[in-house]
Amino acid sequence: MPKLSEEKLQDRKDHIVHTAFDLFALHGYSQVSVNDIVAAAKISKGGFYTYFSSKQEIFYEILDVADSK
């Protein structure tokens, strides 16, 4: 299986973060599940867990991105 470049891995992670942010903004954190993020981002659940261990971890990532701007 071919390995993905660091840039491609970061692009995928960014896509998941942006998708989760949009869902949290629309529906609120407590109303969004990992399944919702996976479906909206059009990735597998395993793809989600490659980058994040939980919904809480992706939320912290969003806060870190917002804090760095």
Image: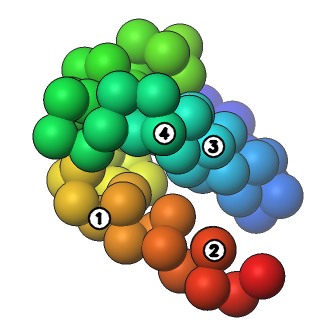
**In this rendering, which labeled residue sits more in front, label 2 or label 4?**
4
Q: Quadrant of residue 7?
A: bottom right
On the image, numbered disc 2 is attached to which residue?
A: 66
Q: Secondary structure at mark 3?
A: helix
Q: How is the image coloured?
A: rainbow
Q: Position of residue 2 (x, y in %)?
A: 69, 36
Q: Height in image: 64 above or below 30?
A: below
x then y, percent, for residue 56? 22, 60
Determine whether the residue tagged by mark 4 lies in a helix, strand or loop: helix
Left/right placement of residue 26 relative to residue 29 reads right
| Residue underneath mark 1 | 57
Q: Report, in whole angstroms, how far the alpha carbon at label 2 lies from the one at label 3.
A: 11 Å
| Three-letter code, disc 4 | Ala
Near-viewer residue (48 or 67): 67
One can see residue 47 in this view: no
What is the distance, in whole Å, between disc 2 and disc 4 at their CAs? 13 Å
The kind of residue on which mark 3 rests is His
**Residue on which the image places disc 3:** 18
Residue 60 occupies quadrant: bottom left
For the N terminus, the image quarter is top right
Q: In the current view of this chain or complex, which residue is farthest to the bottom?
A: 68
Q: Which residue is mark 4?
A: 25
User: Going 67% across and 51% down the picture, which residue do you hit?
Assistant: 14
The mark that comes first in sequence, 1 or 3, is 3
Q: Nearer the viewer, mark 2 or mark 3?
A: 2
